Amino acid sequence: MNDYVEVRMDVTPCDENHTDILAALLCEHNYESFVPDDKGLTAYVKKELFDSDIFRQVIADFPFPATVDVKWDTVEGRDWNSEWEKNYFQPIVVDDMCVIHSSFHKDIPSLPYDIVIDPKMAFGTGHHQTTSLIIKRLLELPVEGKSVIDMGTGTGILAILAAMRGASRIDAVEIDEFAYVNAVDNVKINNHPEINVIHGDASALADIAPADIFIANINRNIITGDMNAYATALRDGGIMILSGFYDDDIPVIQDAAEKCGLTYIDRNMRDRWVSVMLKK
């Protein structure tokens, strides 16, 4: 069976933090994929796992003062790769150096770094501005021979690029089980078995040797809450690249980072989204 339930949640007021928290709460109830927008979140779960009663719990646990209106409908089974090809996932080219595409795409430009990502339904594909911002960082930094931790790896794009750029060790950590499985699959597709994909949260960092480069593309609240664990996982002199937040959030990120012994270096920005680079 390949049927899903599509759940639409309209949130008033709504911003990225609202949709990120909703997605995190729904992950605990077998939801596999999420499409956020400026009015709320569309989420998908296998039909046999759908339970309408969970929304009372999710809304009760929602930490923001907001109204959440929920409606849902069944989406009949289909070729989801074909749906992505037609409606969502188009190849991405960054700086004429890196192309990200699915195995079903044709006529892909020949570039130094060719990453194949086969997302599950609407799960992340690298189109978001923050992913492109970090890709640009990884294309500019000297990665060869460096150890890298990719926190919140998602589909594994950034970890795979680090491996392609010659990183000596790559640990990719992902809390969501569905994303973790997808990352493992994508690592295999790109033939980089040296990438160690770990299912866990920031507590998993305690068992990983400190890295030369630490990446986290998550959101402001999670980053600031876990900053100390991130800093501990970075060796002295190492570089940290953070994204998943807006330009207005930099002072909050910078304050949390400085308390953990990290020094702000610079930022890059796209459509108000930013990545910041820090040094320990």
Image (tube, grey):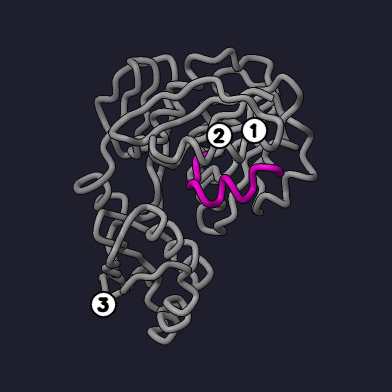
C-alpha distance separating marks 1 and 3: 43 Å
- Disc 2 secondary structure class: helix
Q: Quadrant of the C terminus?
A: top right
Number of the label disc, if any, that sits on residue 123: none
Q: Quadrant of residue 100?
A: top left
Name the one closer to the observer, 107 or 6: 6
Residue position for label 1: 258
The kind of residue tagged 1 is: Glu
Q: Residues within 10 Å of mark 3 (few under 14, many from 20)?
A: few
C-alpha distance separating marks 3 and 2: 39 Å
The kind of residue tagged 3 is: Lys
- Disc 1 secondary structure class: helix
Residue position for label 3: 71
Can residue 226 be seen here? The reply is yes
Residue 66 in the image: state x and y as whole percent: 34, 70
Q: Magenta segment range?
A: 217-229
